[in-house]
Each structure stands twice: as C-alpha cells, then as structure tokens.
Image (cartoon, rainbow, N blue to C red):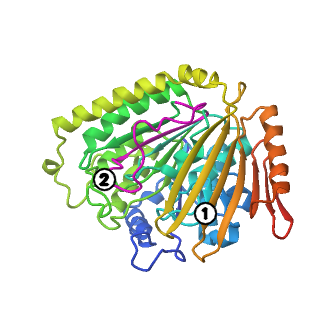
Amino acid sequence: MKPTGVLFFPAFDWAISPTHPEREERLLYTRDQIFEEGIMDLPQVKEYLPRLATPLDISRAHFLVPDLPSQIIEAHLVAAGSGLVIADAFMNDEIKNGFAIIRPPGHHAMTVSHGNRGFCNINNEAIMIEYLRSKYGIKKVAIVDTDVHHGDGTQEIYYHDPDVLFISFHQDGRTLYPGTGFTDELGGPLAYGSNINIPLMPRTTDRGILYVLENLVMPIMEEFRPDLIVNSAGQDNHYTDPLADMRFTAQGYARLNEMLAPDIAVLEGGYSVETALPYINMGIMMAMAGIDYSNLREPDFYPEKLRESSSNLEYIQTIVEKQLKAFRSREEVIEKNRRTGDAFFSEYKNIFYDTDYIHEEQAVQVRNCPKCSGFRMINSSAQQRNGIPYRVFCINIPVNTCSACHNYGQSIYQEMIKNGNYDLVYLQDRVNDQFRAYDIKIEAETILP
C-alpha cells in the first residue's frame, strides 16, 4: 500500500509579530511530538521537502496589487510550493494521500489581494488547484474547509465556478471573524449550489460537526463526484483554541478526516500550539495513513464537558436539510438565471483587510453565457498601507470558458489598456495558462510565462 505524504514547513522567517498567534511555534510542537512518537519512522508515512512556487503558479489564482514582490516574501512561495510538491506526489501515484503542514495560511486571501487579511496574503489551496488543473487536466474539485473561521477567500475565488464545490463549516459569522459564511451564500448565478456554508453555533461538539459530515457533506460528495478532494484543514474548532469558541477534539478531527478521505489536506488555522495542534495533526496523519488512532487523547480531555445540547443538534439538522435541498436544486436555478436576458451579472463589495487595515472597493461583473459559466471582471480600488492608492481592472478567464467568452475577455483587456483610467490592467487567462499585467503609467507589460 502506498504511504501518506507529509511535508512540514514552519516558516521561521515569517510572523505578523513575535508574540502573534500565527508564528512558527504552531508547527514546532507538532513536529517534536510526531518525531517523539515515531510516526515519521513508519512505512505508512513518507516525508517530502518543500520547493518554491513560481510567479505563474501564484498568478493563476491571484491579482497581487501592485505586484508580487511587494506583497509576499519567500516564505509565502515556499508554503504555496509545498502544496504543489504534495500535489505532484499524489498525481504521480507516489502516495495514496498527502498532508501539507505549512504556514503562512491562506484561506482568507481572495482573487484580488492588496495586502494581508486574516493572516493571509495568498491562497495556498487555490494556487494548488489551479496548478493541478493546468498541469494534469483536473476538472472537478471539492474543497472542504474545516477551519473555525469561514474560508471567505476560497469562497470568493470559486464563487462563480460550477466545477469547484466549496463546503465550509465554521463558527457562525455573527460571533466570529470574518462575519461571512451564511446559508444564503450559495454560489454565483451560473454556479448556484456549488458553495455550501454551515454556520455553527459556538460550543458545537464532535457530535454536531460529525453529523454535518455524515448527513450533508458525504451525500453531496457522492452526488458531485469530484476528481479531487481537498481538505482546507483548519484546526481552531478545537475546545482549547484561544481565538474561537467551539468544542471539537483531536479524536473528532481524526474521525472527520477518516470519513472525508481527502486526497490532499493543507493546514490552515489553529492557535492552541501546545495543548491541541500536536494531537490534532497527529490524529489527521494517523487517519490518512490508516493507523489506529483510538488511543489518541489530549492531556486535559474530559468528555463529560463536551456534550452536545439537543437544541443545537436540532438547529444543525435544520441547516443540513436546507443546504442539501439547495445543492440538489442547483441545475434548475442555474438554467433560470441564464434566461434572465442580462448580459452581465453585477455585484459590489467592500472588503476590509484587518491585518493591514486596508479598505477595498470592488465592482464585479460576470458574463451571462449560454454555453459556459462566463468570465469575470473586477474593478478594484484601495489605498495601500504605504498610503499609495491603486485602481486596477482585472479580467479572470476560467479554464472552463468557451471560445466566445475567451475571445471577449481578451478584447476587454486591450480595451481597458486604451481606456487609461486605471493604474494597472490584469489578464488572468487560464485557458492559455498565461498572466498579463499592463502598467498604464510606464506603458509596460509583464507576461507570464
């Protein structure tokens, strides 16, 4: 039997501040415990070393304003590249599944990135998925985000893509950052039902979360039939996490992983660095490798303190029924939306970067195409942390775009350059696997590759 691939990258040279919860100790305690327990010496586990992601790898998923060097450092490239290492190992049939235990995290980073929000500059899972689509032709992907915070960045990146199913269960956004992830956020007009949120009440336990998995997530997976399952493996649902208020256990995380059976898991949040993360990470590794985890326990584990209330379970059952119905009605709603007669669907957003204190305004348009899910245009403006304002126009042409939308998107790129009303004009052409950026002030274009 093939082993489980594991890759550690603690990012010693990156921290928001020396005492910030998001620092290298998050992974060091895990590494110490796993080596002490001898897990890495077992034939069921194979360790991999990281590599750097390329600028094109990053640009398949993001528009970094004003450019890549001003937004990220080498640690970000290594974290993103680590996901690609595990992805290659899985696709080359070296491993049965893989776990990238890395930082910095990424699931709050959106398509356009003006800075750091929610500890994230770039989205590791999205970068990995677009790499897999480009290199291996992967089409349908399911992402299950188990972080306590709603994965709003991943949701935004794939909100209009019907071939990417995004499921997030998290502490209710009325009680926790980023204040999103509600049941009515179901995907764009031509991708309705491909975005499923399960906002959970504070103090939800193993029983409630595993009920969601068994009665909602797994039935949806069976019907969606993805080519690849990715676990955005946040660990801050744990009962000791200092930044949230949930009651999940290491044993619960292991059971969740065993049931979900992801092909690739990528670490996201989790800030109880001594009393939770070493046990959760070990539980996930053991479940993925098929090792018995029944004796895995945190030192302060008292099951009598972690009982699910009957009222909360009833609330969860209501959400599960509602979201399963929404998913199963997706094709009917999409066809109805196509018949509206609108040339474009429009939406307006205000996005706050809590770490860098940046306010961004966006006007988004998605083409209503009868043959595909269209292409997306994002008019974005924000004042950077250094005080410099940027107004950028971004065109995202997905890999599943028809030829008419592809040509239309390319023509708009040239039109916006001539328009001259923006500082930068970007074209993310996933069909041709090409990224282009035009700087209006200096009249210069960058093309990747």
Q: Is residue 175 rendered magenta in the image? A: yes
Q: Are marks 1 and 2 in contact (CB under 8 Å)?
A: no
Q: Nearer the viewer, residue 402 or 28?
A: 402
- In the image, which residues are magenta? 163-192
Residue name at image x 27 percent, y 52 percent = 246
Lower sequence index among marks 1 and 2: 1
- In the picture, the quarter occupied by the C terminus is bottom right
Residue drawn at the location 42% of the way across and 55% of the way down: 178
- Is the stretch drawn in magenta largely helix, strand or loop? loop
**Residue farthest toward the bottom in the current orientation of the protein:** 18
The residue where tag 2 is placed is: 175
Q: Is residue 180 left or right of residue 70?
A: left
What numbered label is drawn on residue 239? none
298 lies above or below 165: below
Which residue is more in the foreground, 121 or 444?
A: 444
Q: Secondary structure at mark 1?
A: loop
What x and y, as percent, mark residue 405?
77, 35
What type is the residue that disc 2 sits on? Thr
The vertical placement of 358 against 263, above or below, is: below
Give the x, y percent position of residue 46: 54, 55
Q: Is residue 368 left or right of residue 13?
A: right
The image shows residue 93 at horizontal and vertical percentages of: 64, 42
Pick the front one: 360 or 148: 360
Q: Is residue 16 inside the magenta stretch?
A: no
Residue type at tag 1: Leu
Disc 2 is placed on an element classified as loop
Q: Is residue 106 visible?
A: yes
Q: Which residue is mark 1?
A: 49
Q: Quadrant of residue 437?
A: bottom right
- Pick the quarter of the image with the N terminus: top right
